[in-house]
C-alpha cells in the first residue's frame, strides 16, 4: 500500500491526512481554498459554524505542543464538533495499556477522528492502518517525518502574501535534519510549483537526502537568503539531536541567526516565517521576530482555518456517503 492509498477512501475522498508527500496538487488547492472560506469565522462575534455538529474528535498528543493542540481544538469547536483532549500522562497507558488497546476503547465510544502527535516517525501512519473504518486520523507531527497541517498553514500564509508560487524563491534555514515541518513544507512547495527552494544550515543539520528533495543547499546564510521572497526559520531541535552537532548557541546565532542586517539581503518585501516555538537570540533576533516583515503570528491564526478545512473535508466525506 502506498502512502497515498491509505489517505484516500475507495471513492477517492480524503479519509486520513498523514503526509503532503505525493498529494495531488488539486487536493492542496482545495484545502487552501476551503481554508480561505473559514478565515472569516474567527473574526465573527459567534465563532461557530454547524458543519461538524454531532462529531467527536480526540486529541492524542504524546509530545508537548502549544500551537498545534490548541488550534486543532479551536478549529474543531468552531466547526461545532465535540472535542476530547486525552492527557496521556494520566491515561491508563501509564498502567500498561497498549496504544492500540487505548484506541480500541476510544473507538468503542463512537469517536470519529484521532488527531495524533507522537515522537516516533510513522506513528500516525501506524495508527491509521489499525483504526476501525469509521475513524479518520490526522497527523499533528510524527518524529522528524511530517507535520502536514503545519506545511499546509505555511503555504496558506505564503499564498496570502505572494499568490504566485511559480515566481518564488524560498529559503528554509536552520535544523532541517530534524524538522518534520521542513519536510512537509518542501513537499508542498514542490507540488505547488515553487522553482527555487533553498535549504540553509550547517553541514550537520542538513540531511543527506536534501538534494533528492529538490532543494538547493547553502551553508553560508548570507548567500542562502540573498534575494529570496520567503525566509522560513526553524528551531534547533535539541531533543532529537544525538551527540554534538553544533558549536555554542552564540556561535550558531552568529552564523545562522536571522538578524536585521542579514534580513536586508533578502528581497525588500520578503516575509519572515517560523513555525514556533521560537528561541529568541538563538535562531532569530527579537527585532526581526516582532518586526514588520514577520508573519509568525499570522501563521498561528491561519492554522485554525487550515485545520477547519482539513477536518471538514475529511469528516464531511461521511455526510456525502
Ligand atoms: N508549530 C508547532 O508544531 O508548534 P507546537 O509544537 O507548539 O504545536
Image (cartoon, helix red, strand yellow):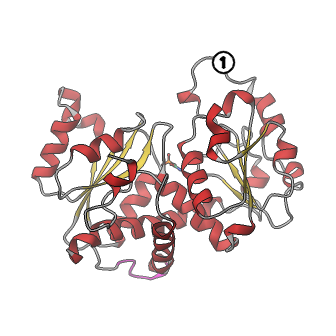
State the residue position of label 1.
Answer: 244
Q: Position of residue 59 (x, y in %)?
A: 31, 51
User: Image check: 159 left or right of 253?
Assistant: left
Residue 319 seen by the camera: yes
Quarter holding the C terminus is bottom left
Q: Is mark 1 within 8 Å of ligand 1?
A: no
Above-or-below relation of 20 to 91: below
The residue at the point 62 percent across, 58 percent down is 189
Identity of the residue drawn at 40% across and 77% down: 47
Residue 100: x and y in percent read 19, 37
Query: Within the image, what quadrant is residue 293 found in?
Result: bottom right
The answer to if 47 sits in the magenta stretch is: yes
The picture quadrant where one finds residue 153 is bottom right
Q: Is residue 61 visible?
A: no
Q: Residue at x 33, y 56 (%)?
A: 16
Q: Quadrant of residue 82?
A: bottom left
Position of 92 with respect to 292 (left or right) is: left
Residue bounds of the magenta highlight? 43-48
Question: 248 or 202: nearer the eye?
Answer: 202
Residue 88 covered by magenta stretch: no
Relative image position of residue 220 (x, y in whole percent):
84, 38
Q: Residue furthest top?
A: 243
User: For numbered disc 1, what is the local secondary structure?
Assistant: loop
Circle 1 residues within 10 Å: few <14, some 14–19, many ≥20: few
Query: Which is the main secondary structure of the residues drawn in magenta?
Result: loop
Query: At x 35% / y 70%, what residue is drawn?
Result: 313
Coordinates of residue 182 in the picture (x, y in percent): 60, 46
Amino acid at each position: 500500500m502506498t502512502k497515498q492509498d491509505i489517505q484516500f477512501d475507495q471513492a477517492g475522498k480524503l479519509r486520513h491526512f498523514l503526509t503532503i508527500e505525493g498529494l495531488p496538487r488539486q487536493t492542496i488547492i482545495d484545502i487552501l481554498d476551503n481554508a480561505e472560506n473559514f478565515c472569516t469565522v474567527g473574526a465573527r462575534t459567534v465563532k461557530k459554524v454547524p458543519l461538524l455538529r454531532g462529531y467527536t474528535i480526540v486529541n492524542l498528543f504524546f509530545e508537548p505542543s502549544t500551537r498545534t493542540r490548541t488550534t486543532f481544538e479551536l478549529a474543531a469547536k468552531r466547526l461545532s464538533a465535540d472535542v476530547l483532549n486525552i492527557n496521556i500522562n494520566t491515561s491508563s497507558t501509564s498502567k500498561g495499556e497498549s496504544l492500540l488497546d487505548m484506541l480500541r476503547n476510544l473507538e468503542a465510544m463512537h469517536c470519529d477522528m484521532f488527531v495524533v502527535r507522537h515522537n516516533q516517525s510513522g506513528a500516525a501512519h501506524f495508527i491509521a492502518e489499525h483504526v476501525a473504518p469509521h475513524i479518520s486520523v490526522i497527523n499533528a507531527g510524527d518524529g522528524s517525518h511530517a507535520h502536514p497541517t503545519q506545511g499546509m498553514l505555511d503555504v496558506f500564509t505564503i499564498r496570502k502574501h505572494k499568490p504566485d508560487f511559480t515566481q518564488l524563491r524560498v529559503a528554509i534555514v536552520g535544523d532541517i535534519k530534524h524538522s518534520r515541518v521542513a519536510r512537509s513544507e518542501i513537499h508542498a512547495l514542490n507540488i505547488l510549483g515553487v522553482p527555487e527552494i533553498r535549504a540553509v544550515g550547517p553541514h550537520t543539520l542538513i540531511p543527506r537526502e536534501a538534494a533528492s528533495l529538490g532543494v538547493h543547499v547553502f551553508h553560508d546564510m548570507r548567500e542562502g537568503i540573498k534575494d529570496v521572497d520567503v525566509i522560513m526559520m526553524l528551531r534547533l531541535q535539541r531533543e532529537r539531536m544525538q551527540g554534538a552537532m553544533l558549536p555554542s548557541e552564540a556561535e550558531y546565532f552568529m552564523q545562522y541567526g536571522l538578524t536585521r542586517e542579514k534580513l536586508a539581503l533578502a528581497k525588500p518585501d520578503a516575509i519572515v516565517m517560523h513555525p514556533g516555538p521560537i528561541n529568541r537570540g538563538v535562531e532569530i533576533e527579537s527585532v526581526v521576530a516582532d518586526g514588520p516583515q514577520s508573519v509568525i503570528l499570522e501563521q498561528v491564526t491561519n492554522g485554525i482555518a487550515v485545520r477547519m478545512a482539513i477536518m471538514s473535508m475529511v469528516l464531511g466525506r461521511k455526510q456525502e456517503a
